[in-house]
Image (spheres, rainbow, N blue to C red):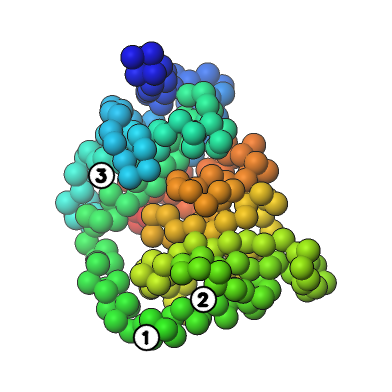
């Protein structure tokens, strides 16, 4: 009972932060900025997309929050029929939050806001005319080489971008990472890639097809030293400090969490706040 009450209090405080109509540290006449709560509103969070409710639900990797959000959808035919409400999910599992630096609702709120902006973008794109359909993705998968060739592409790409790669067990590959002089020996750090052939095919089709080496180079490139794993999560390979899901990013990245939105290219918003009246929606 005590734990349930603690979770309820956490969610209530989080909802209050996310739905605060007048956050401090932001000009009322220019609401598209970052307030004292750390939430970046340059993409219209709080005005063009907003949180309406939070509900605790069971997820694949523990408790999650089901977030109902609203959208300011312009009455324009070029958008097709986009519902003005949508639903997204974010993690709530305690260990993940604590390891990720989100023990308090105040720390977690900016992350949730970014996740809901991305959920809103997916919601809009899935209802817009001309959206790439699952049929198109399936066509891409049919064009892929045989599974054995796909797997060898992964092994070869890891070896080129990292160092010697060894499949220590099915779906688990150890890669020794070369230093700045491309030197590798028994003392070189190891990154473990945890992915099945089925999962790698999904990654290859949706993210890496056409340039496997560049895709892997970004994952194996400069990172926090404790990010010793690449794990399959939500259809992609991501860095993590642990093999277990959900993934946890390295400590060096956590202090930057509130600034990520400011560097994210583009925006989701239905009404572009800083564009001309006749600008084409994103």
Residue at 27% in and 78% down: 139
Q: CA distance from mark 2 to mark 3?
A: 44 Å
Kindly indicate the quadrant of the structure image that contains residue 232.
bottom left
Mark nearer the N terminus (2 vs 3): 3
Task: Report the residue at 39% width, 54% height from top.
Answer: 234
Point out the image quarter for the C terminus.
bottom left
- Looking at the image, residue 275 sits to the left or right of residue 270; the answer is right
For label 2, the residue is: 154
For marks 2 and 3, give the one nearer the viewer. Answer: 2
Name of the residue lying farthest toward the front = 169
- Residue shown at the point (22%, 62%) measured from the top left: 129
x 69%, y 59%: residue: 222
Visible in this render: residue 19? yes
Name the spot of residue 184 as percent of width and height, x first: 77, 72
Q: Nearer the viewer, residue 49 or 115?
A: 115
Give the answer, above or below, for where 203 lies relative to 118. Answer: below
Taking the view exactly as shown, the residue that stands out farthest to the right is 181
Q: Is residue 69 visible?
A: no
Q: Relative to 112, does residue 281 appear above or below in the rendering?
A: below
Mark 3, other Cα within 10 Å: few <14 / some 14–19 / many ≥20: few
- Taking the image as shown, residue 77 lies to the left or right of residue 263, namely left
Q: Which mark is residue 237?
A: none
* Mark 1 or mark 2, earlier in chain: 1
Within 10 Å of disc 1 (Cα), the crowding (few <14, some 14-19, many 20+) is few
Query: Helix, strand, or loop for circle 2?
Result: helix
Disc 3 on helix, strand or loop? loop
Q: Residue 280 or 100: which is nearer the viewer?
A: 100
**Residue beneath label 1, please?**
146
């Amino acid at each position: 009972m005590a734990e349930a009450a603690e979770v309820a209090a956490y969610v209530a405080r989080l909802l209050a932060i996310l739905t605060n109509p007048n956050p401090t540290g932001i000009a009322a006449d220019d609401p598209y900025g970052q307030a004292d709560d750390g939430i970046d509103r340059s993409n219209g969070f709080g005005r063009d997309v907003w949180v309406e409710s939070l509900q605790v639900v069971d997820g694949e990797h523990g408790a999650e929050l089901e977030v109902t959000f609203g959208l300011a959808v312009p009455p324009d035919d070029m958008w097709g029929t986009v519902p003005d409400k949508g639903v997204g999910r974010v993690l709530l599992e305690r260990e993940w939050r604590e390891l990720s630096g989100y023990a308090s609702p105040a720390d977690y709120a900016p992350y949730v806001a970014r996740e809901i902006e991305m959920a809103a973008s997916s919601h809009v794109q899935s209802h817009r005319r001309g959206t790439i359909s699952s049929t198109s993705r399936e066509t891409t998968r049919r064009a892929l080489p045989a599974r054995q060739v796909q797997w060898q592409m992964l092994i070869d790409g890891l070896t080129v971008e990292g160092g010697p790669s060894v499949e220590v067990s099915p779906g688990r590959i150890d890669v020794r990472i070369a230093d700045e002089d491309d030197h590798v020996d028994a003392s070189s750090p190891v990154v473990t890639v945890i992915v099945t052939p089925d999962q790698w095919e999904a990654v290859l089709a949706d993210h890496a097809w056409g340039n496997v080496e560049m895709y892997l180079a970004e994952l194996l490139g400069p990172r926090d030293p404790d990010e010793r794993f690449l794990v399959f999560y939500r259809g992609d390979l991501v860095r993590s400090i642990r093999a277990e899901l959900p993934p946890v990013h390295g400590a060096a990245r956590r202090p930057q969490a509130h600034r990520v939105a400011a560097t994210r290219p583009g925006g989701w918003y239905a009404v572009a706040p800083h564009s001309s009246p006749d600008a084409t929606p994103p």
